[in-house]
Image: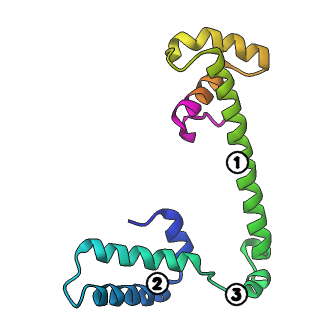
Amino acid sequence: MLPVRAVVEIRGRLAELADLVGEHLAQARADAGGRQLDPGRIGAAVAAAVAELRGRPDAPAAELESAPGPDGYPVEAWRALVARGHGLARQRLAAHRELGLLALRVVPGYIAERDAEDVLHILGEEIGSNAEKLRSCRRFVLTGDARAIDWF
């Protein structure tokens, strides 16, 4: 199964992908000495073809700069906007991480959330936040999973 990001990156390039898969499968057959390929080798050949296609630009750079994107803006302008959004998201995650680390200094991870509520409420009042946000940031630091963060 391909990740969604891979599907988006190779969308519209199925003919090129089919050619690459054929080349990789032919190489795998040659390496196997003409024997029948097991499913693991076939999957590895397809994964290598997808990885190679994702690594290739889908159009020369000169065409990308002049190609219109959504709403008539150049593609490069959209890419810059997306890169800026990714940067802001990383900054926001870093801020939530710092809040979570602060919450963990005040209420260590071995203390249950229900027991930490009162202390985190006091901390939240001191720093201009609230206990709910501090708890979610604390969970984020403990688990490393950004889904723990309440994005409010």
**Considering the numbered disc 2 on the image, is that residue within a helix, a strand or a loop?**
helix
Residue 144: within the magenta? yes
Q: Which residue is mark 3?
A: 60
Neighbour tally class for label 1: few under 14, some 14-19, many 20 plus, Cα within 10 Å: few
Q: Nearer the viewer, residue 120 or 73?
A: 120
* Residue at 57% over, 17% down: 108
Q: In the rendered structure, which disc, 3 or 1, sits on the residue that comes first in sequence? A: 3
Amino acid type shown at disc 2: Leu
Q: Which residue is mark 1?
A: 89
90 shown above or below 128: below
**Picture coordinates of residue 79 (x, y %)?**
74, 68
Q: In the rendered structure, which disc, 2 or 3, sits on the residue that comes first in sequence? A: 2
Q: In the rendered structure, which disc, 2 or 1, sits on the residue that comes first in sequence? A: 2
The answer to whether residue 140 is seen in the rendering is yes
Which quadrant is home to the C terminus? top right
Q: Is residue 101 left or right of residue 139?
A: right
52 shown above or below 19: above
* Residue at 71% over, 14% down: 123
The mark found on residue 17 in the picture is 2
The mark found on residue 36 in the picture is none
Q: Is residue 136 left or right of residue 74?
A: left
**Picture coordinates of residue 91 (x, y %)?**
74, 44
**Considering the numbered disc 3 on the image, is that residue within a helix, a strand or a loop?**
loop
Which quadrant is home to the N terminus? bottom left
* Residue at 70% over, 39% down: 94
Q: Residue furthest left?
A: 35
Q: Which residues are magenta?
A: 139-152
Label 3 close to label 1 by CB (< 8 Å):
no
Neighbour tally class for label 3: few under 14, some 14-19, many 20 plus, Cα within 10 Å: few
